[in-house]
Amino acid sequence: MAGATLLTIIILALFILANAIRILREYERGIIFRLGRLMGAKGPGLILLIPIVDRMVKVSLRVVTMDVPSQDVITRDNVTVKVNAVIYFRVMDASKAIVEVEDFLYATSMISQTTLRSVLGQVELDDLLSNREKINQQLQKIIDDQTEPWGIKVSVVEVKNVDLPQEMQRAISRQAEAERSRRAKVIHAEGEFQAAEKIAQAANIIGKTPVGLQLRFLQTLTEVATEKNSTTIFPVPIDLFTPFIKKLQAETEKNE
């Protein structure tokens, strides 16, 4: 009988000791409630509790990565898109995260979804596709301001995917194709303009020097001669015969 009583006492003592001792990791904090009253956060390491009187809620201080489900958003220019995001946050004040809100993970997820729809509904589609960094910063600031009373710090918010309707994808493709065609035509026109300027400059230089014109003529004649043509008709400028004509006129005047 005494042995059974001793065994019962030992088992009861082990049970009480097991419920009184808690070991918290480096990234964990324990929120202690004594008879329902908040006693504060403890940890990491060995924590001693008063059995039955104390209750501990464990909170992780590591960064939480949370996916924000796809949201149907109507942009400012009335385009319906599906947008999802990812949010990175961590608990900065463990006591507030337990006392101020019932479930801080669920609350942060809900506030992220509503903020995503609200902010993206105020921007146009072009801004959503091109100014992603600015929108991410705006989302981070708004969500962080709303979760601060809960002791939560939102560090990064990233818009992941923007799913466009098929007709909008085709319209964007046509717009991009038209833009590329416009740029090609502008570049071609600029090239033609520059070439015309260079040709006009070359014509002015050659026109000021008759010898240069003759050299250019001979060069062109040489280039044509290299082609495999059976017959080549090439106009000869009268300037080449000017010296001979002058000499003939001088001899004619001398004989007279």
Image: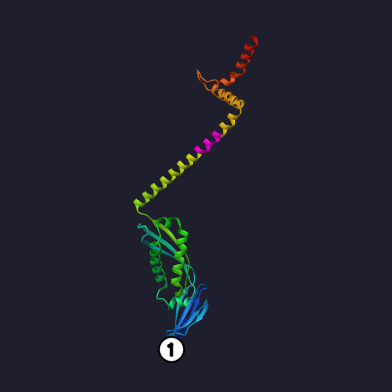
Tell me the magenta residue range: 192-200
Q: Position of residue 88 (x, y in %)?
A: 47, 66
Quadrant of res 5 = bottom left
Number of marks drawn: 1
Q: Nearer the viewer, residue 218 or 172?
A: 218
Q: Residue at x 45, y 58 (%)?
A: 132
Q: Residue at x 45, y 61 (%)?
A: 135
Q: Amino acid at mark 1?
A: Thr
Residue furthest toward the bottom?
A: 2
Q: Residue at x 43, y 77 (%)?
A: 98
Vertically, is 73 above or below 247?
below
Instruction: Let me know if residue 193 is in the magenta part.
Output: yes
Residue furthest toward the top?
A: 255
Q: Read off the residue under disc 1.
A: 5
Q: Position of residue 134 (x, y in %)?
A: 47, 61
Q: Nearer the viewer, residue 33 or 158?
A: 158
Chief secondary structure of the magenta portion: helix
Q: Position of residue 236 (x, y in %)?
A: 55, 20
Tell me the quadrant of the picture where the C terminus can be found: top right
